[in-house]
Image (tube, rainbow, N blue to C red):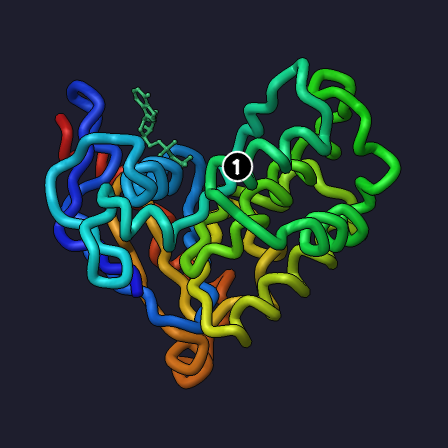
Amino acid sequence: MLSVSHVTKKYGKVVACDDLSFTLDPGSVTVLLGPNGAGKSTIMKSVIGFLRYEGEITVGGYPNKTTDARRLLGYIPEMPSLYPNLTVSEHMEFIARAYKLTDYKERKEELFRRFELTDKQKKFGDELSKGMQQKLNICLGLLPEPQVVLLDEPMIGLDPHAIKELKLILEEMRAQGRTMLVSTHIIDSVDMLWDRTIIMDHGSIRANVTRDELDSAGKTLEELFFEVTEGTGDNREAQEK
Ligand code: ADP
């Protein structure tokens, strides 16, 4: 459903993503793990078509920057960028128009209910707390019901209720055959959720395993994470000298 092939992204001399390749299957949740600065946001922004990069990315077989691919793609960015002078409800209307959605009212209400925003609908973007902004950010990303959803550090700033709802929604979307890529640097926040984990560090993929593969190896996600990431910083510094 999503194919990333030999993608390299440099910011000047910084190689944020170094020859990354992976594919994601329909009906799966993949967790993209890695320390700060590993390149997680950069690969997500590349997939969504915000950045220029070397290599190829396709969504449902379509090159990611085409209209056909964009129709399939949803993105929940790490930093919500809300309009200060639109209300919570108007933000959803804006997305509905941008995606030419019809019959979205029920879904909008359901998302507001699940993320406890129903009584905040008339509040303006700049009146919302950080957590409420993040909840609206998630609702905006989910309203168009994308087939492939990228969530960049979605749990940050959420209260326990919203985290529980988001996890439930991810499970529902998986059952509907949709494809999700969830980036995080907090291993515990996703432990029960994932089918595949990709661990990145210093712009490279250090591990790409399914849950079954990890179970057969008799390791926890945390053990694998430290095994593949620890010490790499020193190595990298040595290589760069
Ligand atoms: P992560 O999401 O895993 O924390 P990022 O993709 O944000 O990592 O960053 C990967 C690397 O690219 C880091 O070294 C970061 O400093 C660098 N980087 C990210 N965005 C920019 C930018 N706009 N300009 C220059 N360097 C950047």
Q: Residue at x 17, y 45 (%)?
A: 7
Q: Percent position (x, y) of residue 62?
A: 20, 56
Q: Is residue 228 left or right of residue 175?
A: left
Q: Percent position (x, y) of residue 126?
A: 71, 16
Q: Percent position (x, y) of residue 64?
A: 24, 47
Residue 106 falls in which quadrant of the image? bottom right
Q: Is residue 237 left or right of residue 224?
A: left
Could you say which is closer to the camera, residue 153 or residue 50?
Answer: 50
Q: Is residue 128 left or right of residue 68?
A: right
Q: Secondary structure at mark 1?
A: helix
Q: Quadrant of the N terminus?
A: bottom left
Could you say which is closer to the camera, residue 122 or residue 29?
Answer: 122
Q: Residue at x 55, y 67 (%)?
A: 173
Q: Quadrant of the C terminus?
A: top left
Quadrant observed for ligand 1 in the rendered image = top left
Q: Residue at x 68, y 65 (%)?
A: 168
Q: Answer few, some or many: residues within 10 Å of disc 1's Cα (few below 14, many 20 plus, some between 14 and 19).
A: few
**Is residue 156 depicted above or below 143 in this figure?**
above
Does the image show residue 237? no
Could you say which is closer to the camera, residue 100 or residue 31?
Answer: 100
Does the image show residue 62? yes
* Three-letter residue code for mark 1: Arg
Q: Percent position (x, y) of residue 226?
A: 43, 55
Q: Which residue is mark 1?
A: 97
Q: Residue furthest right?
A: 119
Q: Residue at x 54, y 29 (%)?
A: 79
Residue 3 falls in which quadrant of the image? bottom left
Residue 67 falls in which quadrant of the image? top left
Q: Residue furthest bottom?
A: 216
Q: Is residue 52 left or right of residue 42?
A: left
